[in-house]
Image (cartoon, rainbow, N blue to C red):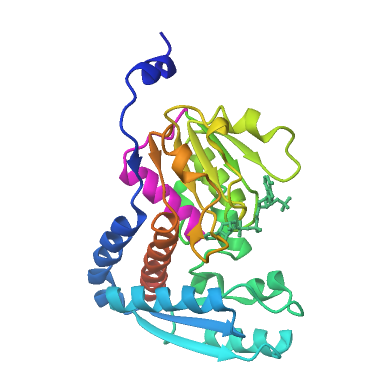
Amino acid sequence: MALDGLFFIFPSPMKILDGKALSEELIDSAKDEATKWKPKLAVILVGENPASLVYIKNKKKACERAGIEYEERRFPDTITQDQLISEIEKINTDDGISGLIVQLPLPEHIQVPLVIRAIDPKKDVDGFHAYNLGKIFLSPDFEDLPPATPSGIIRLLDHYDIPIRGQEAVVVGHSNHVGKPVSIMLLNRNATVTTCHIHTKDLKSHTKRADILIVAVGKAGLITADMVKKGAVVVDVGINRTEDGKLCGDVDFENVSKKASFISPVPGGVGPMTVAALILNTVHAAKRQNLKP
Ligand code: NAP
């Protein structure tokens, strides 16, 4: 009898991928290295996007917990692209700052790729620069500053001893910061990877095959229980707000959790893991800069 059939007769209890607890553990584990390498993180915020204000507050709290110096540089949303790039260049050449994040989104008149390209790759702790993204194509050994959300997802799977090698992994969403890099990181760990997106024909035919299903779209209720294989590991990256203002992911948690073997909640799953990965990148960036002759 196929394993899927056994699961039907003896369903094992679903387990939560607790990103919040693991994130705290990882941030605490970074303290010793932070004391040794003295990282300093600078965050550039343009405008006052309410979600961005929450995200940077969480990043600041995580830095405080890890003992990382933190500095915010805020600019009005009237800042020009050239002015913003010149602010980035000041930080690039400031030896006292080892990590830099430009909080996204940026106002429409600013071209995000040009801004990211301006960040010194060795200070790019979000892992968004083409240099750092390019390195993850080679192998896990080259993931020096991997993009924070994909890195957080892989750490979450590893922590729960979820096998990746040989598994069918399906990623829904192909953004440069989440879907594409997590697909590559799974491929480098020898999963068989399918990446789906808005133009994918018959999404369900793909998601149904997934041993590991990663959903990063930003559309509440996109993944329903009939789209998920019994016993699948489901990682929900999406962040959406319900009409009553509550946070939810892209996965119908209530019903999918009855079929999944593991599932990440929203909030409390990938979000905190992204912050933890960012902290680990910040410490790693400082270490590499200190070791440079
Ligand atoms: P994004 O850049 O908007 O990308 C969304 C992706 O989903 C695109 O590849 C898009 O395809 C695809 N898509 C849209 N509708 C689809 C559909 N109906 N079926 C299949 N694919 C579809 O967003 P992102 O930055 O990757 O983020 C995705 C979600 O994750 C958002 O909710 C975001 O807030 C959340 N997020 C969470 C964290 C965290 O730490 N938890 C971090 C980053 C992002 P096209 O480009 O072809 O339209």
Residue 91 percent coordinates (x, y): 53, 86
119 is higher (above) or lower (below) than 224: below
Q: Quadrant of ligand 1?
A: bottom right
**118 with respect to 54 (left or right):** right
Q: Is residue 115 above or below residue 12?
A: below
Looking at this rendering, what residue extends furthest in the top direction? Answer: 1
Residue farthest toward the left in the current orientation of the protein:
32
State the image coordinates of residue 256 (x, y, percent, origin top left).
Answer: 47, 38
Task: Answer yes or no: is residue 102 visible.
Answer: no
Is residue 139 shown left or right of residue 86? left
Q: Which residues are magenta?
A: 146-166
Residue 230 image-quadrant placement: top left
Q: What residue lies at 69% left-to-right and 72% top-to-bottom?
A: 112
Q: Is residue 162 magenta?
A: yes
Which quadrant is home to the N terminus?
top left
Q: Is residue 290 visible?
A: yes
How many numbered discs sit on the rendered protein? 0
**Relative height, residue 36 to residue 273 (above, below):** below
What residue is rendered at 50% in x and 71% in y? Answer: 122
The answer to whether residue 276 is above or below residue 7 is below
**30 relative position to 81: left or right:** left
Image quarter hosting the C terminus: bottom left
User: Farthest residue in the front direction?
Assistant: 244
| Coordinates of residue 191 in the picture (x, y in percent) | 50, 33
Residue 244 is situated, as x and y percent measured from the top left of the image, at 53, 64
Depth check, front residue: 229 or 247: 247
Whether residue 237 appears in magenta in the rendering, the answer is no
| 243 and 188: which is toward the camera | 243
